[in-house]
């Protein structure tokens, strides 16, 4: 089972899109392992986006992600990284397919609503930045046999 960290960014929270986005995740059959509303401080933002340090958009990214509350969640499942990335859509909403979260709700690349881990390794690393082991649960649902082989 893979884990993906998902962040509903400040624009998603401010626009009232928490419910619609979480609904898509749950309806797809992904298992929630952790969920919280929080503010990301600058130190955590810099650790999370360290791969982008030195790029022209880095400071704006840090300023934006720390500008308001976010919802952070961990989802688990087989091939969850690829599945979530497909649901989220292209980073640039103009190129995001209709039916994806960004394709349906986002307008600009700098306000693209959502972050999702891009590899199993990053899923584990990002999860550990935002959640301690005791904050994560293994959710077993009665519908799992109807969703997973």
Image (cartoon, rainbow, N blue to C red):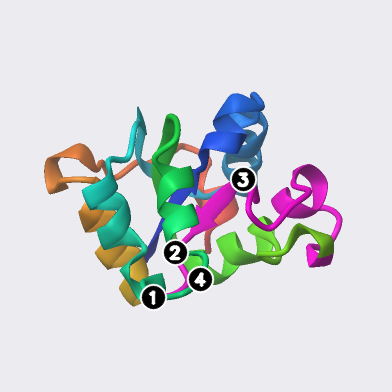
What residue lies at 27% left-to-right and 41% top-to-bottom?
A: 41
Q: Is residue 7 magenta?
A: no
- Residue range of the region highlighted in magenta in the rendering: 95-119
Q: CA distance from mark 3 to mark 2?
A: 17 Å
Q: Which mark is residue 54?
A: 1
Q: Quadrant of the N terminus?
A: bottom left
Label 1 sits on a secondary structure element that is loop
Please report contact status of discs 3 and 1: CB closer than 8 Å, yes or no: no
What separation in Å lies between label 3 and label 1 (alpha carbons)? Answer: 23 Å
Q: Is residue 100 visible?
A: no
Q: Are marks 2 and 1 in contact (CB under 8 Å)?
A: yes
Distance in Å between CA atoms under marks 2 and 4: 6 Å
Residue at the disc numbered 4: 56
Residue closest to the far right? 98
Please state which of the two labelled residues, at mark 3 or mark 2, is closer to the viewer.
Answer: 2
Q: Which residue is mark 2?
A: 58
Q: Which of these two is toward me, 127 or 52?
A: 52
Picture coordinates of residue 118, whole percent (x, y) = 47, 71
Query: In the visual, does 1 lie left or right of 6?
Result: left
Q: How many marks?
A: 4
The mark nearer the N terminus, 4 or 3, is 4
Task: Give yes or no for contact between labels 4 and 1 (Cβ–Cβ under 8 Å).
Answer: no
How busy is the neighbourhood of tag 1: few (under 14 within 10 Å), some, or many (20 plus)? few
Q: Relative to 20, does residue 76 appear above or below in the rendering?
A: below
Look at the numbered discs 2 and 4 and tell me whether their residues touch, using CB distance below 8 Å: yes
- Give the residue pinned by disc 3: 113
Q: Nearer the viewer, residue 17 or 42?
A: 42
């Amino acid at each position: 089972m893979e884990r993906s960290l998902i962040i509903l960014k400040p624009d998603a929270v401010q626009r009232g899109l928490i419910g619609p986005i979480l609904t898509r995740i749950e309806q797809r059959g992904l298992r929630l392992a952790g969920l919280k509303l929080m503010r990301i401080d600058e130190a955590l933002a810099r650790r999370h986006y360290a791969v982008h340090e030195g790029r022209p958009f880095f400071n704006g990214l840090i300023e934006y992600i720390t500008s308001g509350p976010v919802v952070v969640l961990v989802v688990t499942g087989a091939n969850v990284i690829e599945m979530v990335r497909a649901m989220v859509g292209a980073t640039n909403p103009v190129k995001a397919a209709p039916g994806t979260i960004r394709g349906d709700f986002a307008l600009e690349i700098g306000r693209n609503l959502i972050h999702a881990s891009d590899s199993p390794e990053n899923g584990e690393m990002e999860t550990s930045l935002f959640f301690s082991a005791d904050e994560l649960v293994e959710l077993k649902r009665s519908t799992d046999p109807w969703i997973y082989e």
